Each structure stands twice: as C-alpha cells, then as structure tokens.
Amino acid sequence: MNILVLGANGQLARNTTRVLLRDTDAKLSLYLRRAQRLKNPSPNRVTIVEGDVLDRAKLTAAMKNQDVVYANLAGDMKKQAESIVAAMHATGLKRLIFISSMGIYGEVPGERYTSVLDPYRDSAALIEASDLDFTVLRPGWFTNDPEVSYSITQKGEPFVGHDVSLNSLSDLIVKLTTTSGLELRASIGVSRG
Ligand SMILES: NC(=O)c1ccc[n+]([C@@H]2O[C@H](COP(=O)([O-])OP(=O)(O)OC[C@H]3O[C@@H](n4cnc5c(N)ncnc54)[C@H](OP(=O)(O)O)[C@@H]3O)[C@@H](O)[C@H]2O)c1
C-alpha cells in the first residue's frame, strides 16, 4: 500500500504519519512545501517530495504508483481541491481522504460559523461532486489527549460533541486508508466518543 500525504508538515499529518509507520507497513510519500523542514522518519518506507499542491504537474507526478491520497491542507482549499481532483483524474487514482472541518453544513447545534469556513465548504462541495471514492472528515477541535475515543456522525445528522484528539483522528485515518470500502463517498463528523 502506497499513501500520498499532502501537506505533510501539518500538525495532524505529522501525527498520522507516526501512527501509519507504527501500525501499518504502508509506504508513504510525504508531499510538502519547503521539504527541508521535515526529517525523514523512516528512509526505507518514506519518500519526501517537495511540492505545492497547486503545482498540478508536480502533484500529478507524485500520484504515480500511489493507492490512496490523504490531504491535510489549509488555506485556499478550493483551489487545492480542484488541483487534487484534476491530478487524480489524470492518474486514475480514486481513493481520497480529505480533512475539512466541523460546521461546513451548519450541522453543529448552537454554532453559527461565518465565511471563515468558506474554503472548507467550497472544497468539500467540489470533492463531493466528483466521481472519486472520497471520505471528507469534519473533525471537532483537536486536542493532545493521548486517548483514542471518537464517534462519527454522517452528513445530514447533527454534529455531536466538540473536540477530538489527534490520536483519534489518526486512528480513523489509518483505518480509512488501509480498509477498502470504509466510509466511501461519505462526509463524516468526528468528535470525542
Ligand atoms: N486545529 C483544529 O482544532 C482543527 C479543527 C477542525 C479542522 N481543522 C482543520 O484541519 C486541517 C488540518 O489541521 P492541521 O492542524 O494539521 O493543519 P496545519 O498544521 O495548518 O497543516 C496544514 C498544512 O497544509 C499545508 N499547505 C497549505 N497550502 C498548501 C499548498 N498549496 N501545498 C502544499 N501544502 C500546503 C501547510 O503547509 P505549510 O507549512 O507549507 O504552510 C500546512 O503544513 C486544517 O485545514 C485545519 O484548519 C483544524
């Protein structure tokens, strides 16, 4: 199993890389800007690729021979999602795990999120409209609690809870990347169970 991690220097991506190396035998390509920031944690299994997700040619090249794309991004997420979907189409890759945020559908009881979530909404909408085997994750606030404990809500259901540990999200991402058919074409809320 070959997994391409986009935005590999992100907080959640770094935690998930650690858990993927510990709990699976997957080979990882860690794609990030300014790659000198990241030390290769396992040269036998990890390739570090310097690149911007908006550089479509480089992204397409990085997708060669991959099985799964795990996108852990921030910023102009609509443009990033467009680039990812196009590169996945170009390479025939189908499986995408995409980190978004709670609140994009107004699904968090008592919370009104403003335009700060627009990039998350727009990118999720674009991915949901694609023909990819996506799972969009809508996590609550990240915590450093070492515990793994989470529950999932589906799109259309009210979000339950408020926060979720990085370890819980990494546990779920490992399951999603390594188990075929899990939460396919789904957008799931994730919070402490
Ligand atoms: N923290 C929370 O409680 C929380 C809750 C819900 C959702 N989220 C969302 O979940 C996502 C992941 O969280 P996180 O804490 O891991 O985020 P993070 O630490 O900010 O990581 C995001 C990564 O995306 C990379 N990136 C941005 N634009 C890129 C581009 N064009 N090409 C390549 N890489 C690019 C950044 O790289 P550079 O270092 O090069 O800028 C950064 O490393 C974020 O969107 C975050 O907003 C967070």
Image (cartoon, helix red, strand yellow):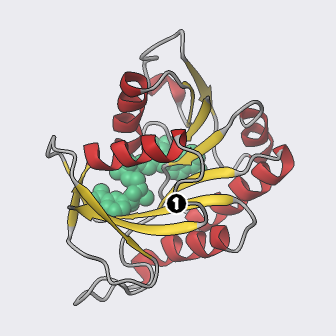
- Vertical placement of 159 versus 2: above or below? below
Of residues 72 and 20, the one drawn nearer to the viewer in this rendering = 20
Q: Where is residue 159 in the image (x, y as percent from the top left)?
A: 31, 78
Residue under the point 21% across and 63% down? 163
- Vertical placement of 37 versus 89: above or below? above
- Vertical placement of 171 versus 98: above or below? above
Label 1: which residue? 183
Of residues 7 and 16, the one drawn nearer to the viewer in this rendering = 16
**Quadrant of the image occupied by residue 16:** top left
**Quadrant of the image occupied by residue 19:** top left
Q: Where is residue 117 in the image (x, y as percent from the top left)?
A: 43, 76
Badge 1: few (under 14), some or many (20 or more) residues near its Cα, within 10 Å? some
Residue under the point 44% across and 67% down? 188
Q: Where is residue 57 in the image (x, y as percent from the top left)?
A: 80, 42
Instruction: Tell whether 128 sits left or right of 174.
Output: right
Q: What element carries label 1?
A: loop
Residue under the point 46% across and 13% down? 42
